[in-house]
Image (spheres, grey):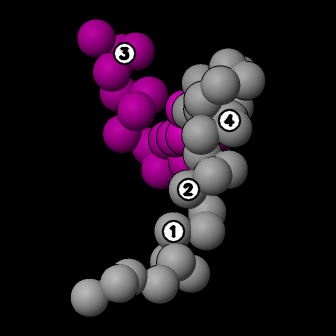
Amino acid sequence: MEFLLWFTKFENTKPLSLVIFFTVFVGVVIYLYGNKQRGEQLESFKNIPLHDDDI
C-alpha cells in the first residue's frame, strides 16, 4: 500500500509522467517513420493543403 502513496506526492509524479509521455512520443515516431512505405505516404500528405480543387 505504501507504493500507492508514492504517487500522491507531486514531486514523484512529474518525472514519472514525463518519462511515460516521452516513451509514448518516441514510440509513435518510430511507428510512423519506421516503415519506409508509411514514411513516404506521410511525406506525400504534406502538400494536400496546397492542391487546388477543380470545382
Question: Residue visible at 47% across and 84% down?
Answer: 52
Give me the C-alpha separation between circle 3 and circle 4: 45 Å
Q: Bin the neighbour count of mark 3 within 10 Å (Cα to Cα): few under 14, some 14-19, many 20 and up.
A: few
Which residue appears farthest toward the top when viewing the image? 1
Disc with the residue nearer the chain's start (2 vs 4):
4
The one of 9 and 45 positioned closer to us in this rendering: 45
Disc with the residue nearer the chain's start (4 vs 1):
4
Q: Bin the neighbour count of mark 2 within 10 Å (Cα to Cα): few under 14, some 14-19, many 20 and up.
A: few
Majority secondary structure in the magenta region: helix
**Relative side of 7 to 12, left or right:** left
> Circles 2 and 1: CB distance less than 8 Å?
yes
Question: Residue visible at 40% across and 15% down?
Answer: 3
At numbered mark 4, what does the secondary structure look like: helix, strand or loop? Answer: helix
* 42 is higher (above) or lower (below) than 6: below
Disc with the residue nearer the chain's start (3 vs 1):
3
**Relative side of 36 to 4, left or right:** right
Which picture quadrant has residue 31? top right
The one of 15 and 35 positioned closer to us in this rendering: 35
Which picture quadrant has residue 54? bottom left
Q: Which residues are magenta?
A: 1-25
